[in-house]
Amino acid sequence: MILFFATVLGLNVLPAFAPPTWSVIVLFKFHYNLNTALLVFFGAIAATIGRTLLAISTRKLSRFIPIDTRENLTMGGAYLESKLGLKWLWFLLFAISPLPSAQLFEAAGLMKLNLTKLTLAFFTGRIITYSIYATGASTLKDTNLGLIFRNILSSPFAWLFQIFGIVLIIIIVIVIVI
């Protein structure tokens, strides 16, 4: 379980191109036959710590961004935090979406958003989604559909989806700042 926790934590500190945590949960479940509930729980904790460290690291790197852009990002972050409806949108985004979260945490770090609320929403959402993925993977393990999913997730399309996520976050930040 320590190896699993360290793997998930390390992958979630990476800014891009890491495999999704749910796939690591499934890998450890099948190769080591670990308890699904423990994998989901410790996976969500490790992912949350990793993403928080990513946001903090990105925040510290913001000193290399031009002052005008930093001020705009800070104002954009303040605007997002002032909108109650947007807070619930963030929660729903993490709770029900498999979107890549690295770029969202990088943006949160640059915008100096309150990481406490964000990480709580992330943790809650990841408990839900990891449970669905782990249970679903266990069910599909011995079917042809499981083989189809395995082939799809190892395709270049998965890499393109990561790149798309990065570009999308950049566009969102530019739209908010301008």
Image (cartoon, grey):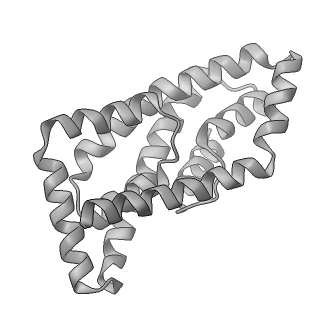
Q: Nearer the viewer, residue 42 or 120?
A: 120
Measuring from the top left, give residue 75's x and y in whole percent.
Answer: 15, 65
Where 88 sits versus 64, above or below? above
Taking the view exactly as shown, the residue that stands out farthest to the left is 82
Q: Residue at 31%, 67% (x, y): give it.
A: 110
Quadrant location, the C terminus? bottom left
Q: Residue at 61%, 54% (x, y): give it.
A: 162
Quick check: 136 left or right of 39?
right
Q: Nearer the viewer, residue 96 or 140?
A: 96
Q: Residue at 58%, 30% (x, y): give it.
A: 39
Measuring from the top left, give residue 115's x and y in whole percent.
Answer: 26, 52
Does residue 172 appear anywhere in the picture?
A: yes
Where 2 sits versus 55, above or below? above
Quadrant location, the N terminus? top right
Q: Residue at 64%, 17% (x, y): give it.
A: 135
Q: Nearer the viewer, residue 165 or 137?
A: 165
